[in-house]
Amino acid sequence: MFFDKFTDVVPSFFGTLNQGPLTLTIFLHTIIVLPMFWIYFSEKKKLGK
Amino acid sequence: MAKENLSVWTSISFWRRSAAWVTGFATILLIWLTFDTMGQISMGTDADLQKGITKRVPAPTVINYHIDYKMSEKRGHEVPVIGKKEPFFGKEWSPKEAAALLHLGKLGSQAKNCMNCHTLLGNGAYYAPDLTKAWLDPMWGATMQGMTGKSTKEEAMAEFLMHPEKYPTHARMMPNLGITAEEAKGLVAFLKHMSSIDTNGFPRGFSKTVDQFKAGGTNAH
C-alpha cells in the first residue's frame, strides 16, 4: 500500500505523511510547485498585455 | 509577432514572485515543523509511567523500571518496553531525585566528553561503541558482573566507568577519566534513561549483535 497505517508513538500530520516511501517529499514538492504554474501563467498574461 | 518573443523565464517579476512564494512557504513549514517536533521530544511525567502511557522520551523515574527491547512487528523495528519496577542502586528514586541524578549524568557525559569517542542518540563518534542502547547490552549482565564482582548491572557499569583500564572489553580500551562514584551513578542513570527513549529503531541492528553475543560471538558494535 502506498499509504501505510500510522504506527509512530506520537501522532502528527507530518508523521502520517511520512509513513510511505517518498510520500512526504512528493506532497511538499507538489504544494510548492503547483502555485508556481499559476505564477508562470499570470506573468505570461501580464507580459502579453 | 510580439507574442512569440515573450519569455516569462527572463522576467524579473516572475522570479521574484516564485522566490517569495518558496521562501515564504518554507518559513511557515519550518515553524510548523518546529512545533510539531515539540510533541515528539517533550519528556513524559512520572504519572504517565504509572499509567503505562507510552512517551517517546519517558520521565527520569524510568530508572526505577525494568527496560526491555523488543521487536515490534507493527513498526518494523525494535522498541523499548518499560516493564515492572526494579531497584536502581538498591532503591526507588523519587521524581526529584531521579531528575537530579539524570542531570548529574548529563553534565558528567558533557564534562568527560563521551561523544569524543562514543555516539549518543546519533551524535558523536564511532571510535568506541554506540551508547544509545548501552544499558540493554547483555554484556553488562553475566560477563561484566563477573569481571567486576558486582551483583547488579548498574553497579557493574558504575565500576567499569570508574576503572575502565582494569577491564579490557573492547579492542580500543577506554581510558580512566577520573569519574567519581557519584558521577558514575549519574552516568549509569543517564544511560538507562537513554535506552528507554524510543529512537525509531536507532541504532539499526542492535538486537542482531545481541543475538550474536548470545550465540557465543562478540558484541562489538
Image (cartoon, rainbow, N blue to C red):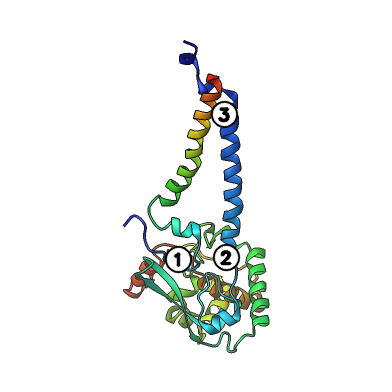
Residue B162: percent from left, percent from top: 60, 74
Sequence order check, earlier mark of 2 and 3:
3
Dividing the picture into quadrants, the one containing residue B43 is bottom right
Estimate how packed mark 2 is, as few (under 14), some (14 to 19) or many (20 or more) residues with alpha carbons within 10 Å.
some
Q: Which residue is mark 2?
A: B39
Residue type, mark 2 in image: Gly
Residues under numbered marks 3 and 1 in contact, where contact means CB atoms less than 8 Å apart: no
Q: Which residue is mark 1?
A: A8
Q: Residue A13: in sight, yes or no?
A: yes
Disc 2: host chain: B
Residue type, mark 1 in image: Asp
Residue at left offset 34%, top offset 75%: B214
Disc 3: host chain: B
Q: The C terminus of chain B is located in which quarter? A: bottom left
Q: Which residue is mark 3?
A: B15
Disc 1: host chain: A
Q: What secondary structure is found at the residue carrying circle 3?
A: helix
